[in-house]
Amino acid sequence: MGNVWSRSEPQEQPQHPEIKTEIVTTTTTTVVKEESAFQVGVKRPVDDKGEVKGESMQGSPAKKPKRKEEWAKKAKKGNNKREQKGEKKEKTLQTRPEHLGPREPRIPKKKVALLVGFNGTGYQGMQLNPNCNSIESVLFEAMVKANAISKDNSDDAKKSAWMRAARTDKGVHAAGNLLSLKMQIPEDYDIVERINSFLPPQIRVWGYVPCIRSFHAKNLCDSRVYEYLLPTCAFMAPEKKILTDTPTFEDDLVISNNDPSNPIVKYATRSTPELKQQRHDYRATQQQLDTFAAAMKIFEGTHNFHNYTNGKSFKEKSAHRYIMSIDVSKPMYIDGSEWVSIKLHGQSFILHQIRKMISMGMLVTRSNTPLSLIPKTFEENKINIPKAPALGLLLERPIFKVYNDKMRAKANQVERDIVDFDVYKDKINAFKEEWIYKKIFEAENQEHVFDGYLTSLDAHLGDDYKYLNPEGVIPDICLVTTKYNRPTKQESDDEE
């Protein structure tokens, strides 16, 4: 037979009003069931220790109730923090610097792209740096005076999200450059005219473009266009120079070698008036012009430019740059001197890259070195390439094609302005003629910058430039060792 279940009368249990006990018996087994008599939503009794009565007796852990004391402590702690913050705010207001004066009425700020141009002569580059007479330091000060930047933000350009599209070196000019920042735009006067009134004539603000809040001058810049003006006397054959241990004239050039372990210092006289006039009147041959143009074309594309900057090794990815186009103009004549213009359009450039590229193109032209040398400079061997003078270099403009295309695509949804230097084309061209081109030619006629540069090349000490040879090879004698290409000791695989 199968099992027969029978229900017996519940046996007496110890007095415990919270627990109901039910005994179920079979022929073979007696089962004791316990049912909790507690109901949901009913408050359970708690003993003096804060434990729920009955549960601890059965071995199950008691649930911890919310304690009012803990919540009270947390609330008190939060109130104290709020009081402390209030005290800090009061202290900030009380310790406002006296030189700032009373707070000015708040003027709404807008994120803008500020279009500028400048002649870099006499300035230590574009970038804003402490204790440095830079283009940005003068511009920032003028904007504070014009109330384009509030006095409260005048102690730190970062408060205005200040950023440039392209950084220029000492003495380098710019017909067009761009800054992104949060700028105050008063309604009762023309802010551009106001800023220019506090600037020297060699630094100009062309205008501004309201832009999206996330606009970043450097990161959103697709490419940059530079121009370099070079006198064709740079293609003349090298002149032999006599070096002396002591200076012959006060303005002699100091010539030193590139060997720290065995430094040598010599002196070379500057060019005679006859040689200066000869260089001024020089006219390049068509073969020289073609050779130089072909040499510059080799730099187009993506290459490793570690030899065309300072402080980068061959293995660094940042040494790779993409050059879109390089074009050399036909000769132009300024005050009886022959010049060529080189336009370089690249995604970005590293420190001294353009000046070293111009110098390499000029060196192979004047020394009749095969153009096959230039591709070798993109390889691992480290060589010394001199920099062409900063005098002839200027930033034409930064390009924001991708950003402008996105703004045009959204024109149907919301009104957006594009970054376009051509809006100020007439003003920019007039400035270039008056404050850049004219100043470059005047500086060369008065200071003979390129003449001094050619003289220093012809009087160079050491074997650094031995790669300028008819074979177009780079001999070991001219290789340079720096901390960026110094070989490291490899651990031996042999066991000790």
Image: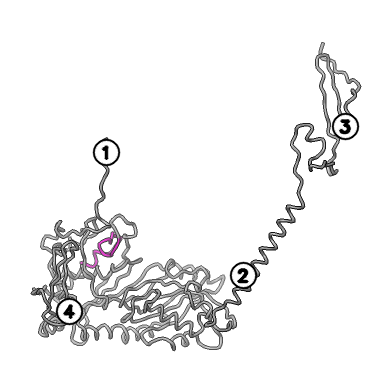
The C terminus: image quadrant: top left
Q: Distance between the residues labelled 2 and 4?
A: 63 Å
Q: In the rendered structure, which segment of residues is drawn in magenta?
A: 293-311
Mark nearer the N terminus (4 vs 3): 3
> What residue is disc 3 on?
16
Residue 310 pos. (x, y %): 28, 64
Q: How crowded is mark 2: few (under 14 residues within 10 Å), some or many (20 or more)?
A: few
Mark nearer the N terminus (2 vs 3): 3
At label 4, which amino acid type do we have?
A: Asp
Q: How crowded is mark 1: few (under 14 residues within 10 Å), some or many (20 or more)?
A: few
Q: How far apart are marks 2 and 3 (CA)?
A: 60 Å
Is mark 1 in CB contact (under 8 Å) with mark 4?
no
> What residue is disc 4 on?
451
At label 3, which amino acid type do we have?
A: His
Residue 308 forms part of the magenta stretch: yes
Q: Residues within 10 Å of mark 4 (few under 14, many from 20)?
A: many
Quarter-of-image position of residue 51: top right
Label drawn at residue 493: 1
At label 2, which amino acid type do we have?
A: Lys
Quarter-of-image position of residue 296: bottom left
Q: In this view, does 10 lie above or below 240?
A: above
> What residue is disc 2 on?
88
Q: Is residue 480 above or below residue 366?
A: above
Q: How far apart are marks 1 and 4 (CA)?
A: 56 Å
Residue 173 pos. (x, y %): 32, 78
Mark nearer the N terminus (1 vs 4): 4
Mark nearer the N terminus (1 vs 3): 3
